[in-house]
Amino acid sequence: NSRFQRNGKKKLMKSKVFIACDTTKIKKIREIISKTKNSKIKIGLKFGLEFLNSKTGRAYISKIKNKTIFADLKLHDIPNTCASAINAIKDLKVDYLTIHISSGLEALKVAKKASGKIKIVGVTILTSLNNNALKEIGFDKDVKKLVLHQARLASKARLDAIVCSAQEVKLVKKVFKKEIITPGIRFSSKTNDQKRTLTPKQAISNGANWLVMGRDITKGNIQKNIKKLIDHLNKWSKV
């Protein structure tokens, strides 16, 4: 029994979660930071286009101390513009920054070269898209084949991490050996605007390094939601 407890604790401590701070309200961000504090799982903060483009967002991020900061800018542009954008955000001292893998190999390489201490994260097919949506856009490959193809490109560009659906982690790990970040993590089957989702324990079981969770944590009682997450992972880790 003690061996299982040790292994379970080890698995739980490996759990790392980026909380998606999808708001422009500083008061809400402060609440998220204070109420997600815990000793069981590592918490990072993910700021997307909404907060980073808000009037007070940039200034606020520059003042955050001792937190892992994920700037989810999803750069998607010509190589020179991607490099310039990375240089322009360096003063914020963020830890992770996203770029669409579909920007192309040259843009990915230039982004990596410009990144300095920032970890460059390649975004595969968005978790809001499924096979039907891809066909509408004009892609002739299905989701899994396209994600695998993009993961190979991210590996070739020597990116530091990759974003993919938790459903594709095992596939991606075959060709990409660094960190894997999985959005679309839900406690229940209610998917909202995501199409390819899994539960936290399924994602970690598949080999995800970081989970991204938003509304399931930030809506309602944040402390209760964090406890629910820890209990959810604890049950899994003791199996």
Image (cartoon, grey):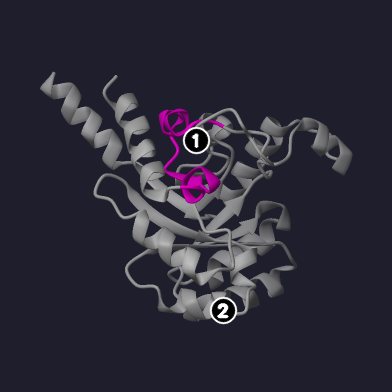
Residue 180 visible in the picture: no
CA neighbours of label 2 inside 10 A, class few (<14), some (14 to 19), many (20+)? few
The stretch in magenta equals: 198-220
Residue at the spot 58% in from the left edge and 58% down from the top edge: 22
Identify the amino acid type marked 1: Lys
Question: For the C terminus, which image quadrant?
Answer: top left
Residue 66 picture location, percent across and down: 32, 68
Quarter location, residue 55? bottom right
Q: Nearer the viewer, residue 182 or 176?
A: 182
**Mark earlier in primary sequence (2, 1):** 2
217 in the magenta segment? yes
Q: CA separation, marks 2 and 1? A: 38 Å
Disc 2 target residue: 56
Verify whether residue 79 appears in magenta: no
Tell me the quarter of the image containing the N terminus.
Answer: top left
Residue beneath label 1, please?
173
| Residue 94 percent location from the top left of the image | 46, 69
- Discs 2, 1 touching: Cβ within 8 Å: no
Q: Residue furthest left?
A: 2
The residue sitting at 53% across, 55% down in the picture is 159
Instruction: Check residue 84 in the rendering and tell me which mark sits there, or answer none.
Output: none
Along the line of sight, which residue is nearer the eye, 84 or 223? 223
Left or right? Give the position of 195 relative to 68.
right
Q: Position of residue 209 (x, y in %)?
A: 42, 43
Which residue is painted at 58% across and 40% down in the image? 184
- Amino acid type shown at disc 2: Thr
Report the side of 101 relative to 133 (left or right): left
Q: Quadrant of residue 11?
A: top left
Vertical comparison of 164 with 239: above or below: below
- Secondary structure at badge 1 equals helix
Graded by Cα atoms within 10 Å as few (under 14), some (14 to 19) or many (20 or more), the crowding at tag 1 reads: some
x and y, in percent, of residue 56 in the image? 56, 79
